[in-house]
Image (tube, helix red, strand yellow):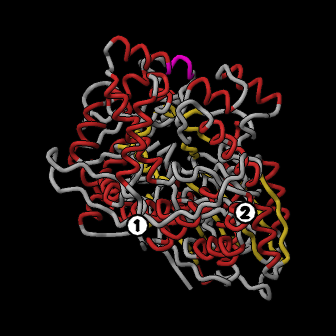
Amino acid sequence: MHTTTSRRALLTATLAAAAAGATAGACSAPTDSSPAPVAPARRPASGGASASPSRPTTQPGRDHERDRRRIDELIGRMTLDQKIGQLFVMRVYGDSATHPDPADVAANRKDIGVDNAAELIAKYHVGGVMYIGWAHNIRSPHQVAGLSNGIQKAALAASVPVPVLISTDQEYGTVARVGAPATQFPGAMALGAGGSAADARTAARTAGAELAALGIRQDYAPIADVNVNPANPVIGVRSFGADPKAVARLVAAQVEGYQSAGVAATAKHFPGHGDTSVDSHVGLPRITHSRKEWERLDAPPFRAAIEAGIDSIMTAHLLFPALDPADDPATLSRPILTGVLREELGYDGVVVTDSLGMQGVRKKYGDDRVPVLALKAGVDQLLNPPKLSLAFEGVRKAVRSGELDEDRIERSLRRILELKARRGLFDDPYTSDRAVNRTVGTREHRATADRIAERTTTLITNRGGLLPLSPRRHRDLLVVGVDAAAPSGTGGPPTAVLTRALSGLGFRAEALPTGTGSSPGPSPERIEAAVAAARGRDAVIVTTYDMVAGSTQRTLVARLVATGVPVVHLALSNPYDIARLGGRGTAPGASLATYCWTDVELRAAARVIAGRATPRGKLPVAVERADDPSRELYPIGHGLTY
């Protein structure tokens, strides 16, 4: 962990860079749907609380008066329970809306008190369903599309038919719920290293088209957090970087990309999760930025998202005393969500909580009270409560007691229904096998992802021009190091992916994994085996994963360097690992950063190593010295080429 002084020094340096304008680099037979492009962004008025609210952008050519009449008619027919249900977004087990596997039926009965998604909708009238890998929602593209159609069929069979907004966490990189054969794109920090708003927009537009073809119409992306704390345990490479202007530019590009494909983008985590040392899944972080620091550092990406017409913004379960001195997380803070987000920033779109099952929001209040307090703060969508029956009854009781009035419920309900109308769900909520076949994981999309990934790989060091390697001079390669568990559905393990890619480029490569985790690192026995296997090779590729002080990953690299065989280091996740590999006689000959270990990024790294692609990435975060975190070893914008 870095000290507060260290974080403050980095923060000061980052703000100075921002002020100077620095940037990084840069069912029934459903019909097919072809999402129309999003309308040009409508900018909110400048100023504070008096600014005019900014409505998210909509599809051109929509009949807004017809949408308004339809929404008015629906709300007029709804019971209180139906109105409340529309505010909830819930998980459900199984790969079918009506006939999941028996084990998933049992899990649903225990967790929610229903058998399947259709019963969830009938009992609780939920307005949204979130797909999760561990809930067995995602097995194959055609299965996901069938699940989506089954959910919509159940929703439209209700007494008041309202299509469901199906969502998922598809950030790409380390967080990707929908895996191969859907196209996998580089994650946020990799795109930050590429520095191209055009690439970020293309990735989001293409990804959005694939999600829409699966029936998923809300994505909890992009990350708008500015990662100024290298010790951040929950954001890290999920962020575009540490320069707020560069992050803002890429966030806006991705909002435009997703929404042009008919998918609601979700900027997260408001008011900013980039300088935390606590994971809000397990604790309650505290942000110590001043109000002025928030304005300059955390706010710009959210302002950019709003100006780009963002459909939804996700809250953070963290304390931010400069914005609200009360001891409540931002998710439950009216001064933050209504005062800052809605009144000061002029945002009038949907506000969705982060998962209500996370400890960061459950530490102070019961699970029946958290949804009520979130609604009072200004939230619209209540995401994934740990016990839906408790949460639902808590909101109903608050309305009946007068703590919440029905008009307040209807304001959120209207925003949610307007979002569904903007994204075409009232016109055509279904997808089809044909849409899946012509969109998901196509050769063109995969080629696009490969080209973008090549522009993100960052060459940090290259002593003596070791790279690129040549099959003539470095034919016999050993690929050794950490085999971190692959993100959902992305293949792996990393050493095997690299070995296959390098073999396909003319090398004779062999994989020798040394373990699966970052701490404490490989055992002495595995280090000895790696050193023995390295001797006599033409070069060694060694992977590391989020090294910490005392990790034996450092010992592995030093011992490999000591063999005299040329060593190429590849940081699979955070780019900070190189700071722990310095020292006379222990540094690798070359070091690269990929920012994630999914197949698309590792294949791109292999092409860079082999000289088939030119390294173009630039560090989107500063790498601090391990022995003195107040000093930079490599600044934002560093990156070599050949």
**Magenta stretch: dominant SS?**
helix
Local SS, label 1:
loop
Residue drawn at x 36%, y 23% is: 373
Residue drawn at x 71%, y 41% is: 137
- The answer to whether residue 229 is seen in the rendering is no
Examine the structure image and report whether residue 47 is included in the region drawn in magenta.
no
**Above or below — where is 167 with respect to 634?**
above
Q: Quadrant of the C terminus?
A: bottom right
Residue in the foreground of this view, choosing between 172 and 426:
426
Drawn side of residue 458 relative to residue 379, left or right: right
Check disc 1 and give the amino acid type. Pro
Residue drawn at x 72%, y 73% is: 443
State the extent of the magenta-drawn residues as a range. Answer: 388-392
**Above or below — where is 586 with respect to 400?**
below
Local SS, label 2:
helix
> Mark 2 highlights which residue?
434
Drawn side of residue 449 relative to residue 404, left or right: right
Q: Quadrant of residue 307?
A: bottom left
Give the percent coordinates (x, y) of residue 256: 43, 64
Drawn side of residue 140 relative to residue 454, left or right: right
**Above or below — where is 359 with respect to 295?**
above
| Distance from the alpha carbon under mark 2 to that under mark 1 | 48 Å
Residue contact between numbered discs 2 and 1, judged by CB atoms under 8 Å: no
> Mark 1 highlights which residue?
635
Examine the structure image and report whether residue 391 is included in the region drawn in magenta.
yes
Of circles 2 and 1, the one toward us is: 2
Give the percent coordinates (x, y) of residue 274: 41, 48
How many marks on residues?
2
Q: Quadrant of residue 388?
A: top right
Badge 2 crowding class, 10 Å Cα cut-off, few under 14, some 14 to 19, many 20 or more, is: few
Give the percent coordinates (x, y) of residue 33: 60, 60
